[in-house]
Amino acid sequence: MPNILVTGTSSGIGFATALGLGRAGHIVYATMRNPARAPQLAEAAAREKLPVKVMVMDVDSDSSVAGAVKEIHAQGGQIDVLVNNAGAGVFGAVEELPLETFRAVMETNYFGALRCIQAVLPEMRERASGCIINVSSVSGRAANSPLAAYTASKHALEAMSEALAQEAKPFNIRVTIVEPGIIDTPMARRAELPLESTRYRQVRRYGALFRASFKSESPRPPGIVAEAIREIIESGTWKLRHPVGPGSVAAIELRKTLNDEEWVERGALDDDAWYARVEREFGLDVRPKR
């Protein structure tokens, strides 16, 4: 069984992935910034006697990433698979989000993944085997307001992954991108909260899409993404992109059917027209309930 390094395991997709891989018998190095603030994973692993080792790693820090990788090697483990899951999500219009917020999201979602890749890639290249899984999003393929900071970071992650896949394949290293749709995680739950103090209609209404998604009949637990990640690892697939979850393929295909100007027009619709459009496309009633 391979040794797997998973980032961002305190909750959501990372938490489910670490547990799912451990239950499948893989040795998992589950990292997070502050394990003391999120003890649930370590407790579950101990209770079930899983091969999951919780470790400190802040993907925003060069020294923290290097230290964690060094510690894994010191414990006698090589890193066969890297799952870059750590991420930050924000919700707001370009004008209204501080520049520091854009920088912080890019630091975690893009540079954090890159930092981890550069830390593990030399060893993978030397032994001519390995797998790098970058958890992106449907937002990595289709940009929607008011997710500019988030979608910019995921577009960057996808572009880097596509280039990396070309570089890594001659060394027998697989690179894949996982693209979840709206998944019921703590980060996504924050997105459903209404934001009224804004000049932009997209900010006011977009949370309704998340609320309606969570109330729909389609299950959206993080475990479905965890299962997709396990299948990628165990199958040996070389497929680059893997949309996951209800509506993910539909959302990506919708973007393909519209040219750039049509996509912009869709996002700029007034509220009533946008609500009707979303209901027609995805079967979700996102209109405010009075």
Image: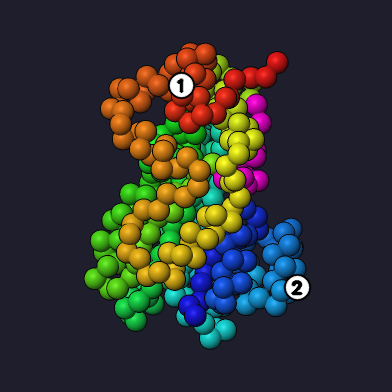
Q: What residue occupies the far bottom of the structure in this picture?
A: 76
Q: Position of residue 165 (x, y in %)?
A: 30, 61
Residue 176 to residue 141: above or below: below
The amino acid marked with disc number 1 is Arg
Stretch in magenta: 183-194
- Give the quadrant of residue 36: bottom right
Of tags 2 and 1, which is closer to the observer? 1
Residue under label 1:
277
Q: Residue at x 49, y 65 (%)?
A: 230
Q: What element carries label 1?
A: helix
Give the CA separation, mark 2 to mark 1.
47 Å
Quarter holding the C terminus is top right
232 left or right of 221 in image: left
Q: Residue at x 46, y 46 (%)?
A: 137
Per the rendering, the mark at residue 47 is 2
Q: Is residue 187 magenta?
A: yes
Task: Indicate the colouring scheme.
Answer: rainbow
138 left or right of 259 in image: right
Q: Quick check: can you spot residue 110?
A: no
Q: Dot 1, crowdedness within 10 Å: few (<14), some or many (≥20)? A: some
Q: Dot 2, crowdedness within 10 Å: few (<14), some or many (≥20)? A: few
In this view, the residue in front, 191 or 275, is 275
Q: Where is residue 185 in the image (x, y as percent from the top left)?
A: 62, 47
